[in-house]
Amino acid sequence: MNSKMATIILASTSVYKKNLFSKLGIPFEMHDPKVDESVFKSKIVDLQDLSQRLALEKARAIYSADTQMMTIGADQVLALGERAFEKPGNLENAQKQLLELQGKTHQLITSVAILGNQVEWVYSEKAFLTMRPLSSSQISKYLQKDRPFDCCGSYKLEESGISLFSQIQCSDQSSIVGLPLISISNKLNELGIKIPAL
């Protein structure tokens, strides 16, 4: 692939991923990969394997080998022990999730896949987040402020959600929001897509 001519497509409709990827300063498009995640969740037990497979399937769903295209898929899995959390979807579920996460350390696995001509790269970034002990009223007040009902784990770290945590261990904090930008930037530069753009 002549990477200078490649069309970069982010296989997502997430506004959070759009805002993150925009920070790289390179042109890109976004397309809905329309991947049925439940098919893979019912078959893959290892949560990092699941995250990587979903990222790859999202990139594959958009990729077309007969075009100058590079697709990027991403997926996040939040694990408390061996159990994965879904996006809460509403206030009640978010309240339950944060009550369960408070006072504990959970793991956030963010995987990214890049597909192009003779390129198939998959990478995972792990973050370990320790949430402070929180009361039900503190959780309710937070949820009313950030309304993170479409966010894995029921918090928005880039907003008031940072105040919920006592410790975060991660080599790339952007991965917590949805994309490991440091690793993506390094890989795209390696593939000839200069960041910052020349």
Image: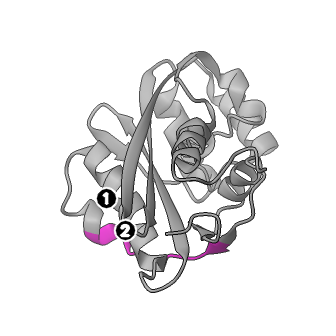
Q: Position of residue 152 (x, y in %)?
A: 54, 47
Can residue 133 be spotted in the picture? yes
Vertical position of residue 139 compared to residue 196: above or below = above
Residue at 37% over, 68% down: 57
Q: Mark 2 and 1 residues: CB-CB less than 8 Å, in contact?
A: yes
Residue at 58% over, 53% down: 192
Residue 160 has which mark? none
Residue at mark 2: 57
Q: Is residue 41 left or right of residue 2?
A: left
Can residue 176 be spotted in the picture? no
Q: Is residue 38 rendered magenta in the image?
A: yes
Q: Is residue 123 left or right of residue 196?
A: left
Residue at 58% over, 59% down: 89
Residue at 63% over, 54% down: 193
Which residue range is magenta in the image?
30-39
- Quarter occupied by residue 78: top left
Residue at mark 1: 53
Q: Which coloring applies here? A: one colour
Q: Position of residue 127 (x, y in %)?
A: 47, 28
Q: Position of residue 38 (x, y in %)?
A: 33, 68
Considering every residue shown, the one lying at the far front of the view is 2
Give the SS element for disc 1: helix
Q: CA distance from mark 2 to mark 1?
A: 6 Å
Vertical position of residue 66 compared to residue 183: above or below = below
- Quarter occupied by residue 17: bottom right
Q: Is residue 190 rendered magenta in the image?
A: no
Q: Is residue 2 left or right of residue 58?
A: right
Q: Amino acid at mark 2?
A: Glu
Considering every residue shown, the one lying at the far bottom of the view is 66
State the residue in front, 96 or 122.
Answer: 122
Label 2: how many residues lie within 10 Å, few (<14), some (14-19) or many (20+)?
many
